[in-house]
Every structure is written in structure tokens, then in C-alpha cells.
């Protein structure tokens, strides 16, 4: 490996009297290695070099730490200060490596599969939400707010194909951990740094598994599988953390293996490109602007690009802006069977959200034009919410899009919320749609016998 140059910056300053030897040395080493790793990632990006792999990053970090330990020892000798013991140096280096290539004291929470959400509001305020809906306050995972910022900065720096900064100039960051958890963090725009971590417990899931855990019933399983096989365009809606991405994965499991899929996300979450069941997948991720405010790649840009990549289907992780126009264009230009998710409080409310997002685009379509486009492109809206006992996520409503009439989308609620909010059959499907779904394997008798 190329030798790492002697450190400059923080190591050149007089060493403060330590609160504890290990903690003091750890903070100095952590600053040095994160600064130099970040600089290397930026330099590689600017030079268009391939990003370092995990093993290369670890080797570089170890080299930086060795040089930093030696540089700090030399400066302490020159200042007439006592050297750190070999045991302190080993422990500090090990803890920094654990933070860099693990997640420090966050690791046990990430390893606990019963935990779905982790929220950290300042260093000592840690709360979790478990899969059964219970909430719990847990001990701190860092010693200070500065430690929390360093942890998120380190996790963001190694999160994927590009460096995602977290500092005063970039106080908001969103990224995915290698194990799939979605991280959102803020600093300086809040009184104290805040971090939210969302885990998708079902990284590989199919419709049968959602039936087994109560999200859908046999009738809905048969219906949704046929919707996918019949190449109907679907929008999955619901509130935050309700399971939209999980349902999208389950729907994708019904897509034939030979089809070419393009997935488009703000932060990688779907993971279909890592699923052996889908051998031909290209996963695209939006890119934030650099410090000069240039270089951004939006979801809308990626949807337009996907149309040139010969997709059989386009899957957008979350529709939240003007990308609704290129997505609906994709759905109506031969890419039938495309899908996306949308934050909405009801299946009917999805149409209002789509109209509001469309007006943000450069096309500046009127609501009437947007509705015509949506009606020609979208076939079904599938809505998720909590069951009446608040213990289960369930599919509660499905709307079939029929037509547009001026400022309104005409739709039929073919599955409506039942007594426990699980969907039950409601308005009949249009005859042509029913025939197509039956040809794709739908069994209407299951819906009548078992409901959702």
C-alpha cells in the first residue's frame, strides 16, 4: 500500500489534558481517520476513480491510524508529555475501527431483530419502537453530541457508491447502512443532533409471507399476484413506516425472473439488485449536489434515463415530487407493470397528492392534464394502514382507476376497509379487468370466501 503522509491539522495542535487516556486518544484518532478517508473518497470521485471496496477502506484506515498514533506520540514527546501506554493505543485503535467498520454501541440495537425504529435525540436520549408496537427508552449509545455527529458522519461516508457528507455545510443526510437500514440525520438545524433509523425486517419477502403475517389474506394474495402478472401499473400508498417498501418488494416477487427491472430510489432500500430471483436489475440512486450546489441527479432525471435502458418495468421507491410526470409517462409508454410508492392518508387521497406533485415539474401541467395522464397510466392504488387494534399493518383499500373527468380522477374502490380495517371485496372490477386478472391466475372465489 502507498505510504500515508504524516498527519497535519488537529494532530499539530497542543494535546489537551485527557478526560481519560482511551477516550482522548480515540477522539483524536477518529478525527484524523474520518478526515483523511473523506478526503480520499472525494478525491476518487473528482478523479472518476472506482470507489474503494470495504477491504481497501479498512486497510487504508489501519494505515492512517498507525501513522496517526506515531505522529501523536512524537508530538507528546516534543511537548514533554507522558506517552500513552501500548494497551491504551491498542484499545483506542480497536474502538475507532469498530466505529468505522461497525457501528460502535449502535451495533447491538441493529442486531436486535425485534427493533424496527431507533431514534436518538442528542447523545443520551435513545428510544426504540419494536415490531409489536411497544416503545422503550434505552441507554446512550455515544458519550456526547460530538460523538453522535462523528458516528453518523462515519456511517454516511461509507454508505454506498458516493460519499454523503454530514457537517455544518451539509446538515441533513439520508443514507442506507450496508445491512439495509435507512438512516436520516440532522444537525445545526436542531438544538441537538438527531438521528432516525428505520429497519425493514423483511428484506426478502413474497406475498405468501405477507399472508402468513396477516398483512393480506388469501383473496388479496391471489388478487395482487394476478395484478402483477397481468402487468398492471400499481401505486402503493400509506403513512410513514407503514410497510410500503415491504409490500413493494412482495409485489416484485411475483414478477417473472426473465424481466429487466430498473429501480429508482433516493436512498437504496429495495435491494432487488441483490436478490437472486431477479437476475437483470439495475438499481439507480439519486445524487445530492456538491458543496458548490451542482452535480445533483434527481429522481426525475433517473426516471427519464431509465426509459433509455430497455426496462420491462420501472419501479420507483417513493414518488415525492415532479418525477410523477416521467413515471406516468413510463407507465403509459409500454412499460406496463411498473410500480411506485406514495405517502398518502387514503387511497382516494393519492390522486390529490399526484396532482400536487405534478405541478412542481418543469412541464407545469394543469390539474386536468395531469389527471388525464394519471388515468391513462395508473391501474390500481393499493393502500396500507394499521388494523383497528393498531397491532398489524394491513392492506385496507384498493382502487381501480377508471377515467378522468376534468379536475377529478374517477375510480372504484374494489376492496374497502372491513370491520378490522382489513380490506374486503367491494365494488366489482370492470369486466375487462376481471377477465385479464382471471387469465393471470386470480381466483375471485377466494376473495368471496376469505375476504382480504
Image: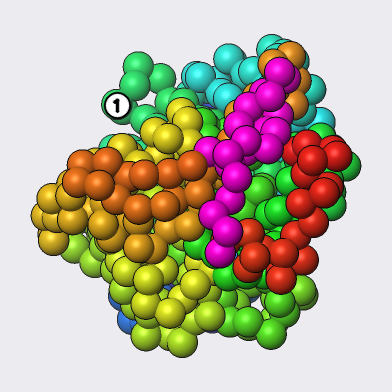
Residue at image point 23% right, 53% down: 370
> In x, y percent, where is residue 191?
35, 17
As drawn, the residue found furthest toward the front would be: 431
**Is 349 included in the stretch rendered in magenta?**
no
Q: Quadrant of residue 89?
A: top right
Residue at image point 68% right, 33% down: 423
Considering depth in this image, is 99 or 371 the residue closer to the camera? 371
> In x, y percent, where is residue 364?
11, 55
Horizontally, residue 293 falls left or right of residue 284, namely left
Considering depth in this image, is 75 or 13 the residue closer to the camera? 13
> Magenta segment range?
413-432
Give the residue number, with chain letter if any, for mark 1: 189
> In x, y percent, where is residue 376?
35, 63
Quarter occupied by the N terminus? bottom right
Q: Is residue 171 visible?
A: yes
Q: Is residue 51 visible?
A: no
Residue at image point 43% right, 79% down: 334
Amino acid at each position: 500500500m502507498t505510504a500515508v503522509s504524516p498527519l497535519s491539522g488537529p494532530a499539530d495542535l497542543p494535546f489537551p489534558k485527557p478526560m481519560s487516556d482511551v477516550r482522548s486518544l480515540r477522539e483524536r484518532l477518529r478525527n484524523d481517520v474520518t478526515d483523511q478517508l473523506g478526503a480520499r473518497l472525494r478525491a476518487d470521485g473528482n478523479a472518476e476513480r472506482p470507489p474503494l471496496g470495504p477491504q481497501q477502506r479498512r486497510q487504508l484506515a489501519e494505515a492512517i491510524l498507525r501513522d496517526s498514533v506515531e505522529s501523536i506520540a512524537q508530538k507528546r514527546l516534543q511537548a514533554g508529555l507522558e506517552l500513552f501506554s501500548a494497551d491504551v493505543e491498542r484499545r483506542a485503535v480497536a474502538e475507532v475501527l469498530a466505529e468505522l467498520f461497525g457501528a460502535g454501541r449502535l451495533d447491538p440495537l441493529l442486531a436486535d431483530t425485534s427493533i424496527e425504529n431507533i431514534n436518538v435525540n442528542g447523545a443520551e436520549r435513545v428510544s426504540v419502537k419494536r415490531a409489536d408496537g411497544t416503545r422503550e427508552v434505552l441507554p446512550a449509545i455515544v458519550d456526547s453530541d460530538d460523538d453522535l455527529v462523528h458516528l453518523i458522519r462515519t456511517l454516511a461516508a461509507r454508505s454506498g457508491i458516493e460519499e454523503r457528507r454530514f457537517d455544518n455545510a451539509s446538515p441533513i443526510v439520508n443514507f442506507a447502512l450496508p445491512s439495509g437500514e435507512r438512516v436520516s440525520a440532522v444537525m445545526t438545524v436542531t438544538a441537538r443532533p438527531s438521528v432516525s433509523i428505520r429497519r425493514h425486517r423483511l428484506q426478502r419477502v413474497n406475498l405468501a409471507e405477507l399472508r402468513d403475517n396477516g398483512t393480506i389474506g388469501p383473496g388479496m394474495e391471489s388478487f395482487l399476484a394476478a395484478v402483477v402478472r397481468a402487468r398492471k401499473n400499481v401505486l402503493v400508498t400509506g403513512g410513514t413506516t407503514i410497510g410500503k417498501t415491504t409490500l413493494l418488494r412482495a409485489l416484485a416477487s411475483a414478477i417473472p425472473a426473465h424481466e429487466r427491472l430498473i429501480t429508482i430510489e433516493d436512498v437504496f432500500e429495495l435491494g432487488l439488485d441483490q436478490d437472486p430471483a431477479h437476475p437483470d436489475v439495475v438499481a439507480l440512486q439519486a445524487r445530492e449536489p456538491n458543496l458548490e450546489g451542482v452535480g445533483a441527479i434527481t429522481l426525475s432525471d433517473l426516471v427519464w434515463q431509465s426509459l433509455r435502458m430497455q426496462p420491462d418495468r420501472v419501479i420507483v421507491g417513493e414518488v415525492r415530487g415532479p418525477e410523477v410526470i416521467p413515471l406516468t409517462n413510463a407507465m403509459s409508454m409500454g412499460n406496463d407493470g411498473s410500480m411506485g410508492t406514495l405517502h398518502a392518508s387514503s387511497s382516494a387521497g393519492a390522486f390529490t397528492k399526484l396532482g400536487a406533485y405534478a405541478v412542481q415539474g418543469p412541464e407545469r401541467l394543469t390539474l386536468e392534464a395531469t389527471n388525464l395522464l394519471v388515468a391513462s397510466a395508473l391501474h390500481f392504488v393499493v393502500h396500507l394502514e394499521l388494523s383497528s387494534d393498531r397491532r398489524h399493518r394491513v392492506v385496507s383499500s384498493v382502487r381501480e382507476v377508471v377515467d378522468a373527468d376534468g379536475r377529478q380522477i374517477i375510480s372504484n374502490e374494489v376492496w374497502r376497509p372491513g370491520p378490522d380495517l382489513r380490506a374486503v371485496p367491494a365494488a366489482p372490477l370492470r369486466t375487462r379487468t376481471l377477465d385479464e386478472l382471471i387469465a393471470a391466475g386470480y381466483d375471485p372465489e377466494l376473495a368471496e370466501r376469505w375476504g382480504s
